[in-house]
Image (cartoon, grey):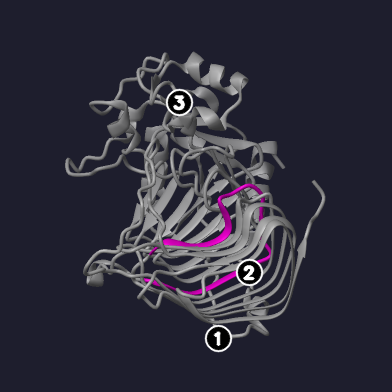
Amino acid sequence: MKKGLFVTLLGLMILGARVEAQDYSKLYEGLPIEVKQVTPIVFPENRVEITEFGAVGDGVTLCTQAFEKAFNKLNKMGGGHLVVPKGVWLTGPIAFKDNIDLHLEKNAIIMFSSDKSLYIDDDKDAKRVVACIRASKRKNIGITGEGTIDGNGAQWRPVKRGKVSDVEWKRFEAIGGEKRDDGQLWYPWNVKSGYPNIAQDPVLQEGMRNDLVRFTNCENVLFEGVTFQNAPKFHVHPCNCLNVIADGITIRCPWNAQNGDGLDFSDCNVGLIKDSTIDVGDDGICMKSGEDKGAKALVNGVSDILIIDNTVYHAHGGFVVGSESVTAMKNIVVRDCSFLGTDVGLRFKSGIGRGGKTENIYIKDIYMADIADQAIVVQCDYQNLHAGAKAQEFKLPKNPKNVPEFTDIHIDNVVCHRATTAIRLSGIKTLNCVHDIEIKNSTIVYTKTGEDIDAETTSGIVIDNVKLVKDEKK
């Protein structure tokens, strides 16, 4: 047998094995509430390789057109697997079509270009550039394999001086850029690479940055095995999607990456997040819900999500609800997860104008260590601030709209070794924002504050068999 034919057959055998979709049904056994199960996603067996379309994995050749041609070819074939072999594949934005699996082999790196002009949206009214990888109203799409997708986010993100060492700060200065706020905030503006700016000033350009992966109004979405890193903003961000699976992925970026969210499910119904590892600059695993888009969206709100066997290292929160929760969140189960070194462990956050009802949330068997702030927190005065902005004193509007409501939340068996504050729950005076929350069978070691529950703004709080132990060591 010729070597080339053998390699091709081997590749088909490997991908063919994926046709046998995983059975996730056992994960749903014994849950405290009924959660709709995800449907495994299967792709056609067709296979093309990116090199067939002129791509070169030398880290220099721009492969944007090759990706476009490959997706078009597979689309005409009815879908299948677009295989990216080992190498460094430099590209501009990638747009998905139906029934396609973007499959990265081991040691394959898709690196997105530093040239911001490549990402300008054709829609003149667009406030942001297009995502590095995007899809809209697509079905049966996936990103799988053992490779890495790098968003080259340092060319987009602002940097706060207080969050980097002298050595790191000098590295940013070497890129070029512009400093503001008395030298305390650096923007990637007029960078030495020579690529053009795409806005009138660095602040406006910062507001244009977008996600590494953003899928909108898509059905049957699979993320499996791949590493996603260094996003310009959020990393993996399905929005208004139905049947979404994140299985065994890794998401990482510098701990101080501005808005560097890991995995955000925004208005997604029926989802599974399992066996994944996250180490990022903002929220780790986050549920968000914006305004109801009606018939324009495939789904609205967040419901029927199972989150199991994940590890979050640095993040603003390990598991997070909010800050946007307008169209409601319900039927979410979080089990058997570890948070190590996050700012907060379990974080529920929202504010007036961004809030809605969060209910029927069950969290169990969560293990934490070295939590910088609170192990568990519910906050209703959250403010969404851009880089360099300062928080304003909270004032209740005369006619508040989109008021947050956190209720019917059940937390069982949290073990935390050292947090600054164990439990902090607070709502808003005169509004029934935080009520009927249960925390039980837990042990939390704290260094400063044990229980900080505002009785005036909360009700129906049950703390049962919870041991709060102060760490007296200095």
Q: Would you say residue 335 is visible in this rendering? A: yes
Give the foreground label among 1 and 3.
3
Please state which of residues 196 and 341 is positioned toward the viewer in this rendering: 341
Based on the picture, tell me whether residue 410 belongs to the magenta stretch: no
Q: CA distance from mark 2 to mark 1?
A: 20 Å
Q: Is residue 423 left or right of residue 44?
A: right
Where in the figure is residue 49, as x and y percent of width and height? 52, 41
Query: The disc labelled 1 sits on which kind of residue?
Result: Glu
Q: CA distance from mark 1 to mark 3?
A: 49 Å
Which label's residue is closer to the chain start, 2 or 1?
Answer: 2
Q: Which residue is mark 3?
A: 184
Query: The disc labelled 3 sits on which kind of residue?
Result: Gln
Where in the figure is residue 293, as x and y percent of width and height? 25, 67
Q: Which mark is residue 22?
A: 2
- Displayed quadrant of residue 369: bottom right
The kind of secondary structure element at disc 3 is loop
* Highlighted magenta segment, given as a residue range: 301-324
Q: Which residue is mark 1?
A: 34
The kind of secondary structure element at disc 2 is loop
Please state which of residues 163 and 216 is positioned toward the viewer in this rendering: 163
Q: Name which residue lies at 54% across and 81% down.
A: 35
Which label's residue is closer to the chain start, 2 or 3?
Answer: 2
